Amino acid sequence: MCSRAAFPPGIRPQGEVLLKAAVISADWAPRPDYALSEEERRTHMARVGSAVWKNPRVQVQELEDPRPGAHDVIVRVAAAGLCGSDLHFFETDADGYMHYPGMARFPSVPGHEVAGEVVETGAEVRSLRPGDLVCLDDMVCCGACEPCRRGFPNQCENLDDVGFTMNGGCAELLRVPARNCWNINALLGRYHGDRNRALEAGAGIEPFTVAYNALFECAPRLKPGAFATVFGAGAIGLAAVQLLRASGAARIIVFEHHAHRRELARQFGAHDVFPANGPEPGGKRPPREIVMELTGGAGADVQVEAAGAFNHTVTEMEACAANGCQIIIIGRDRLRVPLFLENLQVKKANVIGAMGNTGYGTYPNVIRMIAAGLLDPTPMVTDRFSLDEFEQALAKAKSRQGGKVLLRMNGAR
Amino acid sequence: MCSRAAFPPGIRPQGEVLLKAAVISADWAPRPDYALSEEERRTHMARVGSAVWKNPRVQVQELEDPRPGAHDVIVRVAAAGLCGSDLHFFETDADGYMHYPGMARFPSVPGHEVAGEVVETGAEVRSLRPGDLVCLDDMVCCGACEPCRRGFPNQCENLDDVGFTMNGGCAELLRVPARNCWNINALLGRYHGDRNRALEAGAGIEPFTVAYNALFECAPRLKPGAFATVFGAGAIGLAAVQLLRASGAARIIVFEHHAHRRELARQFGAHDVFPANGPEPGGKRPPREIVMELTGGAGADVQVEAAGAFNHTVTEMEACAANGCQIIIIGRDRLRVPLFLENLQVKKANVIGAMGNTGYGTYPNVIRMIAAGLLDPTPMVTDRFSLDEFEQALAKAKSRQGGKVLLRMNGAR
Amino acid sequence: MCSRAAFPPGIRPQGEVLLKAAVISADWAPRPDYALSEEERRTHMARVGSAVWKNPRVQVQELEDPRPGAHDVIVRVAAAGLCGSDLHFFETDADGYMHYPGMARFPSVPGHEVAGEVVETGAEVRSLRPGDLVCLDDMVCCGACEPCRRGFPNQCENLDDVGFTMNGGCAELLRVPARNCWNINALLGRYHGDRNRALEAGAGIEPFTVAYNALFECAPRLKPGAFATVFGAGAIGLAAVQLLRASGAARIIVFEHHAHRRELARQFGAHDVFPANGPEPGGKRPPREIVMELTGGAGADVQVEAAGAFNHTVTEMEACAANGCQIIIIGRDRLRVPLFLENLQVKKANVIGAMGNTGYGTYPNVIRMIAAGLLDPTPMVTDRFSLDEFEQALAKAKSRQGGKVLLRMNGAR
Amino acid sequence: MCSRAAFPPGIRPQGEVLLKAAVISADWAPRPDYALSEEERRTHMARVGSAVWKNPRVQVQELEDPRPGAHDVIVRVAAAGLCGSDLHFFETDADGYMHYPGMARFPSVPGHEVAGEVVETGAEVRSLRPGDLVCLDDMVCCGACEPCRRGFPNQCENLDDVGFTMNGGCAELLRVPARNCWNINALLGRYHGDRNRALEAGAGIEPFTVAYNALFECAPRLKPGAFATVFGAGAIGLAAVQLLRASGAARIIVFEHHAHRRELARQFGAHDVFPANGPEPGGKRPPREIVMELTGGAGADVQVEAAGAFNHTVTEMEACAANGCQIIIIGRDRLRVPLFLENLQVKKANVIGAMGNTGYGTYPNVIRMIAAGLLDPTPMVTDRFSLDEFEQALAKAKSRQGGKVLLRMNGAR
């Protein structure tokens, strides 16, 4: 545990001071059957983390104070959310390998749902000034690969991801490119000057941008008055519920396993909430029947998979599709799901793959909607911990029963 | 004045009874310089009403009870709104010719913003049953011309329009094709069983469908989080304000001449309301400056012309367009407006012509949104009259200062 | 066999003359386990033809001369194509029940790919005149159900289908609503006044409209320069190839089982043609690998399933999707196909259900493109028969090895 | 004049050699009434070139050999086109100020329609290798401003433009970011290995990308089978004609003042070509009448303004719009044009502002279409000059009567 006092508000530490951060370590132990590339051998950036890294552990320790590059800013972090991807660093298989399947190099600092205050800007930065409150867009796209140049930033071939391939926000200070920060000063007014709450809202923006990208960039047919379903009420599913409510969906039907999340879904604007498959009344009836009944036989116009349980969800969704239905897949699931495509044909329906959150105005539109009071991430937060309590925060998040677990840095609570 | 008692609720008059209706008469007096077509001579359906019909007057009188054709329904009218187009029948020029520029034949019954109860259905009608509450879609498209077959129903070449080329709803009973009625039983629940209010809401749906068609069918780029302007807060402008608010616009700025309508705009969800050109504070500043300031320099993403005063509005709109801005023209104005198209180019902006309200799911989506509590036409109603008070209703509507003027038929108030 | 001479060109038979038609008969023999509805019992219009109709047979016989209703036209048929759906009337299972799974009542006249000359028009018809050459849009939508009114004509709930639920075009004369005929006089110029060829082109339009609806109405992201695949080169697949070529696809890769159809695909504009699974060189390599290689690793931007063999096609398509790929399903297959949806997510790709051919300007746009020389259905025709040779035509079509089999009526060849 | 021999093919000059370039000079002489900003004073980068720079002249001289930054490439230029914007540097008003109204600093090298061979790559460049043939995307977007991050790269707030604010391609060597180069090796096959012609095609790509962006990114409703007009057949208008032809337009009607360009329009695929307002037969009839007649009364579905003469074009376009028409403005004109917006409303038509050419896959799609033989820029080239003949090239281009004037560098002809 690190005992140095947190940085005082509004002050950028000068000189060779150190900063506190949660640092993940692990052992480089490529599985015998994994073919290491020359580059992996040289850089220790594994393409498939779970094939190489063993015995992950975390320690809050002191790191060197970062200096900004010409296009970077330094953010004094106020809050960082823990999400499911973060947990995969720490959950291991029987042999001790981490579950995390993406690119990974250690030691590194996690944290990609981040908000804070700009404390220093690089020489070329014009869009931000010290004192600005910002939230993080974690996707650092190269801008040079063909997907980036064709307008597919979420498909960047050289993606860096803050909190994954770059040091993230579970730290007192974060260095990121200025273009990965979005100004959230406008949230201060909406939260009546409560800087603390504005920054917690900022740390909760990322799942909303994932849902916004899915609903309004990937599924362009969505119109006000739609009947909607959301399968799964984790952070992204809940964000989808709020966004659907704020954009004119006439009925939002949610299916979710955990009782606490069902409660949140209702609070976030769902009209009807049902257990996914549980023992409660309603749980034994297939969702398709419930949806057809509640929509007066019309079916759902837009359906969101945010559960990552395709065999329990997508097969239901295709059976209660309205004409022109858009079935949007945000959850991840490595299983094949047997689809009856005639359902899509008869209904002029689509299955739409969605991933990522950057580009196309997702961040500024979500920020504007929060500032206008149309969205509010803060009720999602159920637990707050200091950086020193990182392990307790992790344990709470692993239970996957509550809402969002936040780390509050630099003394904030 | 007609003195027979109104039809009692829920009962369809049988046999040769008569029904009360407001009937417009006028004199067939083609202007000397107007070239009558053979068909006009034969049918007395003038293509340009204002070129032929003189000395309009209205009388509430008894008409024969209509029998439904195989695909028709008979609606016992509960409420009919008066709108600007209706007034043009009665306003005349110096020579006594009516202002109404569209197709017209007299005597006829006005009224196209109508709701009521189905009291009889034709032999082939399956979608409605007696007792259903309905609102009217006044556009009777032919389904056979090329625009209809290509998906442009609002551009139908053989359009009949209830209340204009066919007898309308300022009457106790209305005969229309079943497909021009939309079931609004779902509104009963939203108004807690208040049938009266549900039917008034139904009579107020038409301007919402005009605005819905313009915003979501004609302007497909609109996304939640948009900054919006609405110029003109008559019925359609007010409907646009509510729709924008319900679909996630982050800021809605309204410019309107009449103080009472400004009040309504605020009540309907506008964030900022300004006089168009009046003496009040703010009225002397050009709207373009106000919009740029309130949007933090970003400009407006979507702009609605609902004032019919293009030289005062569109030239402002083009100057405060955000990147990708959609300038939607709903108001009508016969003047040419000098546009600076470079503004559109620099901003990747569009000027979008919108007209009509039928097709593309506009009615069912608006009805769903009202049923869900996302929209509410009823606060727009400021004045109610009985059918016998048609002339007083007309006089009130002509003042164009309040909200919607309703005729309440069959004894309802 | 019927021996009366065909109607002479350009002359509408008067009075009580009879006309020749191919008439399908079958025995009404509901399967024991099929629950007949009251309406089916009354009307003998079976909802599931294959559950009720047994021992189908066809005879060319004389029928009464049809009179047009007010909105109908009478078409003197010149050519009628036989397609796969027609064959299902005649192919039976072990118990003698027809394969055709849709709505069916017998006796009836098949034929929905039809062109001819208007010889009489109903009283209200304004869009066509005797002498006009027309092709048929077989989908008679009701215009009154909610899907029709919402802009989903191909999803009409009360659809009549010429050649299926109404008498079709394998006859000397055809009565249909005028709005189901499209004027093809413009094709005369394109075929240098060869009326015969213009009418054969007209009879070949229907599969092009199916493909046009799928590519340009259902898959709105398609842009010129796309890399495309087409799986299956039957009539619809071949039409898709021509449409892709004419609309700027930069590479069109076709997979097809039958050698003759592969030859047609090449002739119709495919850049690369491969056997689907055959013994020929290339047949053993999975299509996904071929597509990735030929597109330089980019994958396909648009992919058309026109084979109705989802387990052999869609699983390949999802593996060679480019960013933003649209996988369009036109073929029919009653099997479930196991999809790996993560492929869609990683690539921002969609699976799009397509069905039908009416509405949205499909017919007029296809007709314009044929008139402009951009499309040509006529090379698809490989076999021609007279109406009296209906059984031979049927036998040829059943082989499913060639292109289109045409019946040429009224003496034309 | 500079006499050193051109660089031999395929060889990157080493060390301190010099390279030849056309260098524009001018005198810094701010107009008395122009308010210089502090930044302009410091950097001599004028925001409005025509307000500051006087007495422009050009000299072919030797410059220092550029070294690539980490993300740059060095291109050995083969060809550079001169376009209208280039001419504005040299055309002056009565006081000797240049016409060019954009940002400008001198001395600088013009040339933004460029193709050549990569001869050196920066340390971080992975997408290109020495020997690759490339064409230039001249728009160097910052990637960090809000428009860039929202998906509006053509609206970048910190845009650098090669040949305008950075040294361009009228030189033997060009240094640019790798992401501004597109690989055109695929054109070699299409031109049967003729490297010279492939590179001339590459230098002609830019106007096609401007037209592609306008037609397929800005005007998303365009469908195959459309009737089209193009007003103005300069480089961009001609590119629009080819693109419309290659993407399935059924009729393309061109209006153009110069006879030679009319000839090119016909050669490039226009179906009908008319003088804009000239003395030739047809020139006296308004385009609106011609368009209505040639489209059989339907009007045009898509219309392209590429003439920059709005008062002569847009007022015609609005009068011959088909239902759903898209009027796309690419040309530039500083005059206001009086539009009759009711035309747009009645027809559900749009006026669409288009500018720029980057992003959204424009370059790769145009390159694919050229490689597939669907487009061909090379017939546009009517005149070729060596770098030493820059002044003659300029004189020819100023006549604005022919097609494209090319500079061929490094000894190529």
Image (cartoon, coloured by chain):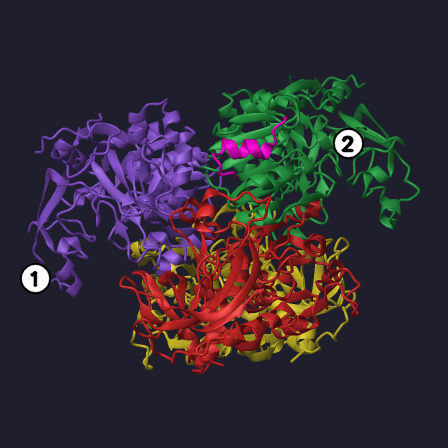
Chain colours: A red, B yellow, C green, D purple
Subunit of label 2? C
Q: Is residue B168 above or below residue C232?
A: below
Where's residue B192, x and y in %? Answer: 69, 78
Measure the alpha-carbon separation of dots 1 and 2: 86 Å
Q: Secondary structure at mark 1?
A: loop
Q: Is residue D277 visible?
A: no
The dot on residue D32 is 1
In magenta, the rendered stretch is: C284-300
User: Which amino acid is tagged 1?
Assistant: Pro
Q: Are marks 1 and 2 on the same chain?
A: no
Q: Pointer 2: what residue? A: C88
Picture residue at 79% right of the left edge, 31% below the top: C89
In depth, the one of A137 and B191 nearer the eye is: A137
Q: Is residue B150 visible?
A: yes
x and y, in percent, of residue B376 in the image: 58, 73
Q: Quadrant of the C terminus of chain B?
A: bottom right
